[in-house]
Image (tube, rainbow, N blue to C red):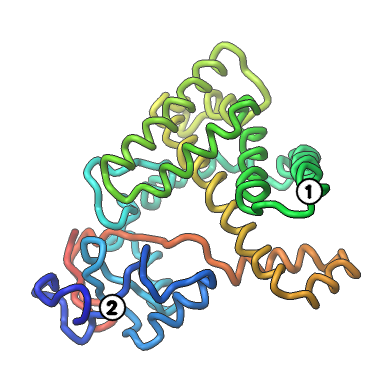
């Protein structure tokens, strides 16, 4: 074991399953995040243990990943932070295992139906045009700061009903949360987001609108309305998902496009191919991990997993 120390390996972990890899700051990972991450663990076992970030397992084979994420009896979504933190944030429905999460997912679905997305499309296009026009005449820009970080925030604020003048504030809150790996920093960033969402909740109680917060305040699950804590937890996960993941997805896609002049020319000549380009980018450029917490001792893939 080089770099992390054999004394940090738990007794139940076989030594041939240990591989030194840091999911956050591994020096082998560069701007080609997906490619260099895959290369860095290419010689590791399909399921391996790293002592970094408090110690955790990593599954890298599609078969193992698929089995783990479907088996909520042993591998739960109730905690999704690496390393584990005190008072972990609670997301609805992401922090709930099936079948408890299903009514909440059903409550969200009307806002993301094909009809609802079609209705949102003109506003999304208008924001895209505005953001592009703001940088087009300059001849250059910081793409992440000036384009990909602003576009999803703008669309999310339209969807949620957050006043547009709070755009930069929302973006900064999301960045603080995702850059936090210590419990105290994560709690502080989370508190800012919850404060912003709490203000919106109170506003929409008195001034309903055609937005997602108003929908959450009115929708019923299992014959009852959502309580304020549930509304906040559902809004919180959408806030984070609507900010960072889309920013990263756009960033990775255009980073790839910027390095492929032939592909640029092809899409310019055949704009009907752009939707296929977007779908292919979604497949190629993974943007999140899918952490699970072991909640029962078990043996899988030749590995001994221990609860916690």
The quarter of the displayed image where residue 62 is located? bottom left
- Which one is nearer the viewer's eye here, 115 or 235? 235
Q: Where does residue 152 sit, x and y in percent of width and height?
A: 63, 45
Dot 1, crowdedness within 10 Å: few (<14), some or many (≥20)? few
Image point (62%, 27%), residue name:
161
Q: What element carries label 1?
A: loop
Q: In this rendering, would 299 be left or right of 219?
A: left
Q: Mark 1 points at which residue?
A: 138
User: Compared to 87, does 98 lie above or below?
Assistant: below
Question: Do the residues bearing badges 2 and 1 touch, measured as CB atoms within 8 Å?
Answer: no
Disc sitting over residue 78 in the figure? none
Image point (15%, 74%), residue name:
5
Q: Where does residue 248 sit, x and y in percent of width and height?
A: 57, 56
Dot 2, crowdedness within 10 Å: few (<14), some or many (≥20)? many
Q: What element carries label 2?
A: strand
The quarter of the displayed image where residue 69 is located? bottom left
Q: Where does residue 97 sit, x and y in percent of width and height?
A: 36, 51
- How far is mark 2 from mark 1, CA to CA? 48 Å
- Which one is nearer the viewer's eye here, 144 or 216? 144
Disc sitting over residue 48 in the figure? 2
């Amino acid at each position: 074991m080089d770099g992390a120390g054999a004394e940090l390996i738990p007794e139940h972990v076989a030594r041939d399953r240990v591989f030194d890899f840091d999911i956050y700051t591994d020096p082998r990972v560069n701007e080609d995040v997906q490619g260099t991450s895959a290369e860095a663990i290419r010689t590791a076992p399909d399921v391996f243990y790293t002592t970094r970030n408090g110690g955790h397992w990593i599954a890298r084979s599609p078969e193992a990943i698929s089995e783990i994420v479907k088996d909520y009896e042993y591998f739960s979504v109730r905690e999704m932070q690496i390393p584990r933190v005190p008072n972990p944030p609670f997301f609805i429905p992401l922090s709930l295992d099936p079948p408890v999460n299903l009514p909440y997912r059903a409550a969200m679905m009307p806002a993301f139906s094909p009809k609802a997305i079609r209705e949102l499309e003109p506003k999304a296009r208008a924001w895209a045009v505005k953001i592009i026009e703001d940088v087009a005449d300059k001849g250059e820009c910081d793409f992440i700061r000036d384009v990909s970080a602003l576009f999803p925030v703008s669309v999310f604020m339209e969807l949620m009903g957050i006043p547009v003048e709070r755009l930069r504030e929302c973006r900064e809150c999301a960045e603080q949360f995702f850059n936090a790996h210590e419990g105290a920093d994560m709690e502080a960033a989370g508190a800012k987001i919850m404060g912003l969402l709490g203000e919106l909740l109170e506003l929409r109680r008195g001034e309903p609108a055609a937005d997602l917060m108003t929908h959450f305040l009115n929708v019923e699950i299992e014959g009852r309305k959502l309580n304020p804590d549930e509304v906040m937890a559902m809004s919180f996960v959408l806030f984070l998902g609507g900010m960072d993941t889309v920013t990263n997805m756009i960033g990775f896609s255009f980073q790839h496009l910027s390095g492929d002049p032939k592909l640029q020319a092809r899409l310019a000549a055949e704009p009907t191919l752009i939707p296929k380009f977007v779908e292919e980018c979604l497949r190629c450029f993974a943007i999140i991990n899918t952490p699970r917490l072991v909640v029962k001792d078990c043996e899988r893939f030749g590995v001994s997993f221990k609860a916690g």
